[in-house]
Amino acid sequence: SFELTQPPSVSVSPGQTASITCSGGKLGDKYVSWYQQRPGQSPVVVIYQDTKRPSGIPERFSGSNSGNTATLTISGTQAVDEADYYCQAWDNSTAVFGGGTKLTVL
Amino acid sequence: EVQLVESGGGLVQPGGSLRLSCEASGFTFSSYSMNWVRQAPGKGLEWVSFISSGSGTIYYAASVKGRFTISRDNVKNSLYLQMNSLSDEDTAVYYCARDYSRGVDHWGQGTLVTVFS
């Protein structure tokens, strides 16, 4: 079955760039979405269709997808960005989420 | 403003049933596909089921196929999830989620389902 693999945790210093990867077979052939989830809150989409940013999402969030890996990049990371991040894609008739990455800003 | 409000969660014994509802507002419900996504305590997100705008296409995760049934009422602007033969592994917060461009663009606040023996 199709799986998406994310690193369990990523650490970044304030103001630096954070990169969170999501790997899956031929992932570049699929659309990837990214979700941010702060503790006790519902997820929020930050990137959809690989690279598109919904209105209201800061420009520091960007996405890419090629080959077997999609990447969420947060430039100039802020303390408010500390959260869990999930990638997601469809494989035929099944939606799949990555295991999630805890982003720590320290 | 798009709003998705889930209800129907609660405590249920193994083998029991529960029906979740999601009331949608702030958009043309009948034009959008919808999903149910769940999250077990302290765990990640798990997709559960999808239903197209007109109910013509329905998908389920392997873990719930044959036990859960998704449906919708476009007149009442509501999405449902009938859950039967519940087990401990179904304990989770269940989110109603609007489908958009092969992803989800709006999520409800979630409703907690606890299966206990």
Image (cartoon, coloured by chain):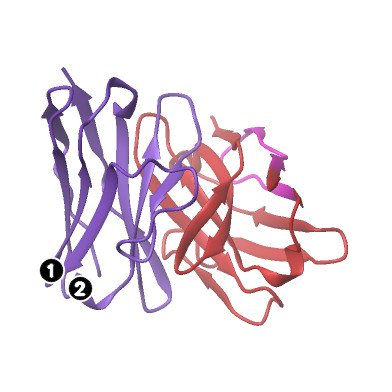
Q: Colour of chain B?
A: red
Label 1: which residue?
A: A68
Q: Looking at the image, which residue is at 60% across and 36% down?
A: B109
Is A13 situated left or right of B113 in this image? left
Q: Which residues are magenta?
A: B5-23
Q: Is residue B90 above or below residue A48?
A: above
Q: Position of residue A75 (x, y in %)?
A: 20, 39
> Horizontal placement of B17 versus A70: left or right?
right
> Looking at the image, which residue sits at the far top?
A106
Residue at the image position 49 percent from the left and 57 percent from the top: B104
Quarter of the picture holding the N terminus of chain A = bottom left
- For label 1, the SS is loop
- Helix, strand or loop: magenta stretch: strand
Q: Quadrant of residue A31?
A: bottom left
Q: Nearer the viewer, residue B17 or B77?
A: B77
User: How far across and how far down the image is residue B102, in percent?
Assistant: 44, 68
Is residue A36 highlighted in magenta? Answer: no
Does the magenta segment cover residue B6? yes
Q: What is the three-letter code of the residue carrying label 2?
A: Gly
Residue A90: mark in rendering: none
The answer to whether B18 is drawn above or below residue A94 in the figure is above
